[in-house]
Amino acid sequence: MSLTLQQIIDDSKNIVFFGGAGVSTESGIPDFRSVDGLYNQKWKYPPETIISRSFYYQHPEEFFRFYREKLIIKGVKPNKAHIALAKLEEAGKLSAVVTQNIDGLHQLAGSKRVYELHGSTLRNYCEKCGKFFDIDYIADASMPVPICDKCGGRVKPDVVLYEEMLDDECIRGAVSAISKADTLIIGGTSLVVYPAAGFISYFRGRHLVVINRDRTSADNEAELVIHDKIGEVLGAVRI
């Protein structure tokens, strides 16, 4: 007899959540690969090309035009999934969130230990002097390419672009958390973006759960698979 999600959570002492864009779609942030996602919208260049390191340096104005319009989304709030995960951490059940998202909604909901594999739109740094700038500075379209007000260097979003490596410290933390977990909940991710998706191979615990609208490559290995909206699923968990 298979266990329910509630039973698995009740039985767990060290849960790690591994999530992707689908976690934030219920907050109004579009994902990348669904029918309505960014990868299926038409631009002068393919989105995968625009958000690459080489494109950023070769066509900075075009990069920031796309970045401001599609990746900076203001006024969004955490949904039931973000809130439920923060409550699980507060209750001592969940030890970490490993996310591919760059929106900062997990922290806004109250999660403390979050490994942002692909960085965050909320952090931006001058490439010359390292001065920090918030999201509003980048969002200001009056400056087609944001320039540091201290040294004149270009201000780069702290997000991992195509052709860039993930942060070593973040990788180590995420892998360590996953390898020590007794339960891994995978949610809102297609598991097709590597190397991030490969991190789940470090899980050696008892319960593997997948919550995603569509099938994933981990479905056959999971103890429990739920094809539904992750906010509704996690929001129904008693904590």
Image: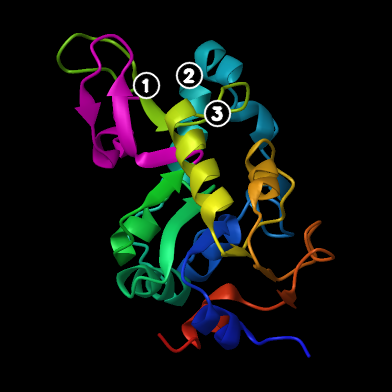
Q: Position of residue 27 (x, y in %)?
A: 46, 68
In the structure shown, which secondary structural element does the residue marked by tag 3 occupy? Answer: loop
Does dot 2 land on a helix, a strand or a loop? Answer: helix
* Dot placed on the residue nearer the N-terminal end, 1 or 2: 2
Residue shown at the point (23%, 17%) measured from the top left = 148
Residue 234 lies within the magenta run: no
Q: CA distance from mark 2 to mark 3?
A: 13 Å
Give the number of the mark in front: 1 or 3.
Answer: 3
Q: Is residue 83 above or below residue 124?
A: below
Residue, x 49% and y 50% (percent of image)?
177
- Quarter holding the N terminus is bottom right
Residue 231 image point, x, y percent: 52, 76
**Callout 1–callout 2 Cβ contact below 8 Å:** yes
Crowd band around label 3 with a 10 angstrom C-alpha radius: few (<14), some (14–19), many (20+): many
What residue type is disc 3 on? Leu
Residue position for label 3: 161
Magenta-drawn segment: 117-145
Determine the secondary structure under disc 1: loop
